[in-house]
Image (cartoon, rainbow, N blue to C red):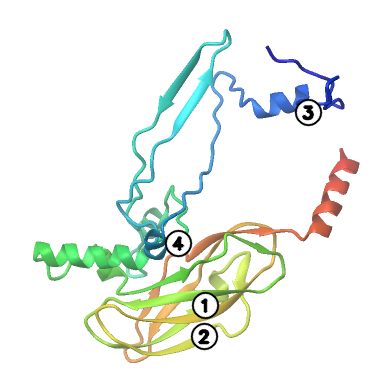
């Protein structure tokens, strides 16, 4: 039995806290015929080894369990199939814009993506299969990868945030590289300070280096940090990188309270 109280009444005679009718309705997840809800889940790597490696292609992310109640109180459960992290899908500038749009679209928002792990796995698989050149292979598309090290999931509006980036050379040749964060390709969260950073010569076959960049959020909301390019200064080759990570930009407490007050007045 559920007792529904007045919206302004949150305690009963015994002084214990109870939910109001409005709060109960808002939290019940009622679905009318033909309605649908969409939820975003965050999956984190808990062990130290998994956190260092990152979530990558083929990792088992678990199952979704939905518990429901029908109008007469009948209960039931529905389980999804096992959710598996998909392979990194990315097109280089050499492909057409239409195919690039299709390849870069994904239903997954990957945070700490383990991109270098995916590329190394693609290279190993190609070597085992005996394929010398395969333009569709991830290691051929991205011989150099850039991925964030422990990126923030939230940042404050207009407050610069330092992020460390790991650059890995997966090719068989040493490369003299430069990291470029191009403002024209960035939205919401942009580079703060120098946008071009010389990395020097990176050894082949897994050679790596780290570099720190500063980012600043211009507006509140959920954004992808993108616009990252790697340039080989010896050959002039440019490699566009997939979005580095997704971040939620929060309003400062003062502005948030002011916005709430304005919403109440408007209502």
Residue at point 54%, 39% (across, down) = 39
Within 10 Å of disc 1 (Cα), the crowding (few <14, some 14-19, many 20+) is: many
Q: Which badge, 3 or 4, is on the more N-terminal residue? A: 3
Asked if the residue at tag 3 contacts the one at tag 1, i.e. Cβ–Cβ closer than 8 Å, the answer is no
117, 158: nearer the viewer: 117
**Element type where label 2 sits in the image:** strand
Question: Label 3 belongs to which residue?
Answer: 17
Residue 25 tag number: none
> Which residue carries the number 4 mark?
112
**CA separation in Å, label 2 and label 4:** 23 Å
Q: How far apart are labels 3 and 2 at the CA level? A: 56 Å
Label 2, residues with CA under 10 Å away: few <14, some 14-19, many ≥20: some
Q: Earlier in the sequence, mark 1 or mark 2?
A: 1
Q: Which residue is mark 1?
A: 181
Q: Position of residue 144 (x, y in %)?
A: 34, 76
| Left or right of residue 206: residue 198 | right
* Secondary structure beneath label 3: loop
Q: Is residue 137 above or below residue 39?
A: below
Marks 1 and 2 close (CB-CB < 8 Å): yes
Total numbered labels placed on residues in the image:
4
Which is more N-terminal, label 3 or label 1?
A: 3
Give the mark, 1 or 4, whose residue is nearer the N terminus.
4
Residue placed farthest to the left in the image? 130
Label 3 or label 4, whichever lies nearer to me, is 3
Report which residue position mark 2 lands on. 196
């Amino acid at each position: 039995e559920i007792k529904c109280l007045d919206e302004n009444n949150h305690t009963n005679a015994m002084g214990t806290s109870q939910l109001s009718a409005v709060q109960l309705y808002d939290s019940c997840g009622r679905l009318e015929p033909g309605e649908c809800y969409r939820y975003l889940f965050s999956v984190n790597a808990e062990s130290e080894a998994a956190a260092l490696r990152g979530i990558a292609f083929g990792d088992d992310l678990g199952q979704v369990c939905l518990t429901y109640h029908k109008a007469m109180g009948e209960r039931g459960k529905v389980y999804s199939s096992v959710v598996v992290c998909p392979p990194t899908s990315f097109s280089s500038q050499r492909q057409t814009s239409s195919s690039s749009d299709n390849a870069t679209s994904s239903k997954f928002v990957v945070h700490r993506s383990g991109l270098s792990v995916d590329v190394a796995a693609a290279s190993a698989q190609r070597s085992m299969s005996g394929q010398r050149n395969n333009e569709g292979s991830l290691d051929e598309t991205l011989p150099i990868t850039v991925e964030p090290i422990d990126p923030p999931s939230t940042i404050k509006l207009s407050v610069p945030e330092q992020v460390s980036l790991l650059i890995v050379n997966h090719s068989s040749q040493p490369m003299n590289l430069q990291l470029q964060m191009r403002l024209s390709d960035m939205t919401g969260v942009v580079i703060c300070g120098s946008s071009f950073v010389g990395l020097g010569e990176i050894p082949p076959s897994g050679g790596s280096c780290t570099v720190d960049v500063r980012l600043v959020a211009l507006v509140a909301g959920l954004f992808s940090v993108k616009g990252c390019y790697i340039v080989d200064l010896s050959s002039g080759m440019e490699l566009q990188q997939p979005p580095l990570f997704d971040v939620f930009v929060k309003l400062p407490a003062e502005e948030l309270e002011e916005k709430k007050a304005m919403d109440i007045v408007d209502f």
